[in-house]
Amino acid sequence: MTYLMLALGFLAAATVVAVVARVAATRRTGARPAGWRAVVLATVALLLLTAVFDTIMIASGLFAYSDAHISGLRIGLAPVEDFAYPLAAVILLPALWTYLGSRRDR
């Protein structure tokens, strides 16, 4: 299994949970999704921090990736697969926040 397949699995799972949570929250209370500006700002910040700190950790030798298991595309020294996890968090967390907040408001 490659890191890309693993990362795509995380993104798919986060997307499914996010869609279900948003639909459930909207049906129950008409809750509105999180503000798009905040989500975009969080996405940019997380992707930038991932690029910087993954590059630093890889350059310092804390860990390495086998070239056989990555796509070969990199941002800095970080393979693009590393960016799937912060992206999954940005997809999943606002949806869960909306869903769990709507449950608490009942």
Image: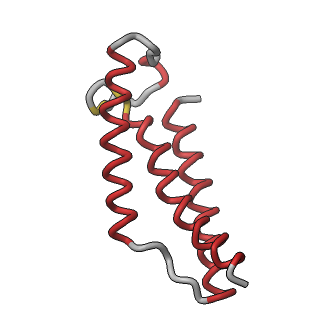
Q: Residue at horizontal 44%, vertical 35%?
A: 82
Q: Residue at horizontal 34%, vertical 62%?
A: 40
User: Furthest-top residue in view?
Assistant: 61
Residue 80: x and y in percent read 37, 36
Image position of 64 (left or right of 8): left
Q: Which of the pair 13/49 is nearer the observer?
A: 49
Q: Quadrant of residue 99?
A: bottom right
Q: Quadrant of residue 5?
A: top right
Q: Is residue 27 above or below residue 67?
A: below
Q: Is residue 37 above or below residue 9?
A: below
User: Furthest-left residue in view?
Assistant: 76
Residue 38: x and y in percent read 37, 65
Q: Residue at horizontal 63%, vertical 73%?
A: 101
- Colour setting: secondary structure
Residue 30: x and y in percent read 59, 89
Quarter occupied by the N terminus: top right
Q: Which of the pair 29/70 is nearer the observer?
A: 29
Q: Is residue 43 above or below residue 27?
A: above
- Total tally of numbered discs in the picture: 0
Q: Quadrant of residue 15?
A: bottom right
Image position of 84 (left or right of 80): right
Q: Residue at horizontal 46%, vertical 15%?
A: 63
Image position of 90 (left or right of 105): left
